[in-house]
């Protein structure tokens, strides 16, 4: 089982939409796929048409050994299931911090689903909290959407320093450009700069009305609008992620 986490220093950068679409592409490629939504806003859950209700709440999920069968829901995409998020996950950092073995809180869940799924996409809350600190040591890849703007690139540098200080290898981080608007000269300039001077994934996800509609349609963009520019870029991103994970 391969675990991929999506995180960002702030909201509104395409983290959740990317998690949902990559999960859909994974399922469409024939991999048994789970979206694990640990963001209390439960955006990934809602985008897949699943009710944002975590059975037993965050305390039961992270604070005890349990059978997760009753909590996992099917999505409208064949082969793609959801471990939903809800508002109780605002307590996740407190639960993790209060655990005597914090690493075990997330590893326990991943171990429980490992026998049933080939790929798990984890939609993390924005920012760096106790949950993120523990998760980076439990996943195979950390995807980070970055808007092409000077402050966002600077924030990525600081974020990368924190992740490495936590003991994660630098190759765990996989930043990629998100919400690129090529009508903006600054975006075009920074896209070229990033591709020549930084270790980013090659795919760049454009700003897209098709992606913005996803919470309303509750269908992944790569399914609802497969020929859109965003879907083409997302498929390119999934190809890079698949290669990094060694998926067939």
Image (cartoon, helix red, strand yellow):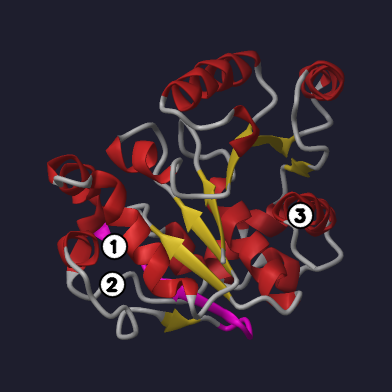
Q: Specify whether residue 15 is in view.
A: yes
Q: Is residue 211 above or below residue 203?
A: below
Residue 229 or 98: which is nearer the viewer? 98
Query: Is 86 in the magenta?
Result: yes
The kind of secondary structure element at disc 2 is loop
What quarter of the picture does the N terminus occupy?
A: bottom right
Q: Position of residue 209 (x, y in %)?
A: 70, 53
In the image: residue 56, left or right of residue 36? left
Residue at position x 66%, y 20% from top? Answer: 149
Residue at numbered disc 2? 53
Answer with mark 2 or mark 3, whichever residue precedes in sequence.
2
The kind of secondary structure element at disc 1 is loop
* Contact? badges 2 and 1 (CB < 8 Å): yes
Q: Is residue 91 above or below residue 114?
A: above
Residue at numbered disc 3? 234
Q: Position of residue 125 (x, y in %)?
A: 39, 45
The kind of secondary structure element at disc 3 is helix
Residue range (magenta): 76-87
Residue 76 or 217: which is nearer the viewer? 76
Residue at numbered disc 1? 86
Q: Position of residue 4 (x, y in %)?
A: 56, 53
Answer with mark 2 or mark 1, whichever residue precedes in sequence.
2
Residue at position x 50%, y 32% from top? Answer: 168
Q: Position of residue 241 (x, y in %)?
A: 73, 52
- Within 10 Å of disc 3 (Cα), the crowding (few <14, some 14-19, many 20+) is many
Distance of label 2 from label 3 (alpha carbons): 28 Å
Q: Specify whether residue 173 is in view.
A: no
What quarter of the picture does the C terminus occupy?
A: bottom right
Residue at position x 81%, y 15% from top? Answer: 197
* Contact? badges 2 and 3 (CB < 8 Å): no
């Amino acid at each position: 089982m391969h675990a991929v986490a999506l995180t960002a220093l702030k909201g509104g950068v395409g983290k959740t939409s990317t998690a949902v679409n990559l999960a859909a592409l994974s399922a469409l490629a024939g991999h048994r796929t789970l979206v694990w939504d640990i963001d209390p806003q439960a955006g990934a859950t809602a985008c897949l048409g699943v009710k944002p209700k975590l059975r037993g709440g965050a305390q039961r999920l992270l604070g005890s050994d349990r059978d997760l069968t009753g909590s996992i829901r099917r999505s409208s995409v064949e082969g793609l299931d959801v471990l939903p998020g809800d508002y109780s996950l605002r307590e996740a950092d407190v639960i993790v911090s209060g655990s005597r073995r914090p690493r075990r809180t997330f590893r326990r869940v991943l171990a429980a689903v490992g026998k049933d799924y080939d790929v798990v996409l984890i939609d993390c809350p924005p920012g760096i909290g106790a949950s993120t600190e523990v998760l980076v040591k439990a996943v195979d890849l950390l995807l980070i959407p970055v808007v092409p703007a000077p402050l966002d690139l600077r924030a990525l540098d600081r974020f990368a320093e924190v992740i490495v200080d936590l003991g994660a290898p630098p190759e765990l981080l996989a930043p990629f450009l998100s919400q690129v608007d090529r009508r903006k000269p600054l975006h075009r300039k920074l896209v070229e700069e990033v591709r020549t001077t930084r270790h980013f994934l090659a795919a760049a996800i454009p700003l897209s009305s098709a992606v913005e509609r996803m919470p309303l349609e509750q269908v992944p963009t790569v399914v609802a609008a497969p020929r859109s520019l965003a879907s083409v870029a997302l498929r390119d991103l999934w190809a890079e992620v698949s290669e990094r994970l060694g998926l067939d």
